[in-house]
Amino acid sequence: MRILFACLITIIEHLSDIYTPFLQLNKRKVIFLYMYDISAGWFKQSHKVCSPNYNDRPENIAVDAIVIHSISLPPGCYEGDDISHFFVNELDCDKDPFYDEIRGLEVSAHLLIRRTGELVQYVNLHSRAWHAGQSQLDEQENCNDFSIGIELEGTDNSPFEMAQYNTLTGVVDALMDYFPKITQERIIGHSDIAPGRKTDPGTGFNWALLAKKIGKKG
Ligand SMILES: [Zn+2]
């Protein structure tokens, strides 16, 4: 079913280059209605893995930012489900020497986009996931309070897959629709809000491509 929709969108994208803006509108609807829609804080098209690592956002705070990260466990390995094990506090830390560095950490993100484009959701979007740590955006500290955290499976110094950009575009568009205060300027990397401490999503992330793809549906 997912492949069918992907094909449909490819055809519509091609046609929309010719018949804009009419088909732009239809394309937006196709993506929103059939690929990435959110119900009660959960993406219907995600694989749901519930993490205990979350709490309530402060009262009267609007979700108005998206923080993009990268992660792979062990670093550079794209097999298995260790990211999910990590986010649900079930990682076997004796399995790899790197895991000593993250032993005992209790963290999460709202979403993970795997190399295949598969979307995994760990925390309800209305809840506060634990992805940003000590951080600041403009004058606001504690970015977990007001942001959505999206992990891309990857490393800080290698390219991401086009399937990941395709999923990310649909997810970001759906989030901007669901949380209208999110603007394109407030879609930022972990390295932007924790400089000197974090380097993800890293040099391999193509910000211009993301901006272009989002802009196409605007
Ligand atoms: Zn990060």
Image: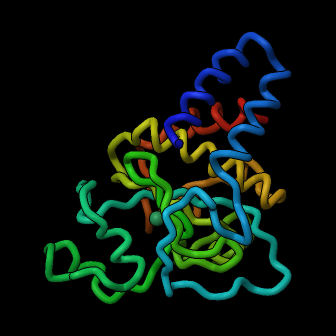
Which residue is at a point 72% across and 65% down the rendered structure image? 39
Instruction: For residue 191, say whether it is visible.
Output: no
Which residue is at a point 57% across and 65% down the rendered structure image? 149
Residue 81 picture quarter:
bottom left
Residue closer to the observer: 166 or 212: 166
Which residue is at a point 52% across and 73% down the rendered structure image? 122
Instruction: Name the residue at the front extreme.
Output: 1
Question: In the rendering, at what x and y percent does residue 125 appear?
Answer: 66, 71
Residue 97 picture quarter:
bottom left
Image height of 43 relative to 106, above or below: above
Question: In the rendering, at what x and y percent does residue 110 appear?
Answer: 56, 69
Residue closer to the observer: 58 or 89: 89
Residue closer to the observer: 81 or 76: 81
Instruction: Name the residue at the top extreme.
Output: 18
Q: In this view, does 81 lie to the left or right of 106?
A: left
Image height of 207 relative to 154, above or below: above
Which residue is at a point 69% across and 55% down the rendered structure image? 37
Question: In the rendering, at what x and y percent does residue 48 appear?
Answer: 51, 69
Q: In this view, does 159 lie to the left or right of 195?
A: left
Question: In the rendering, at what x and y percent does residue 199 appear?
Answer: 42, 58
Image quarter in which the C terminus is found = top right
Residue 142 picture quarter:
bottom right
Residue closer to the observer: 57 or 22: 22
Callout count? 0
Image height of 109 relative to 67, above or below: below
Colour scheme in use:
rainbow
Image height of 102 relative to 210, above or below: below
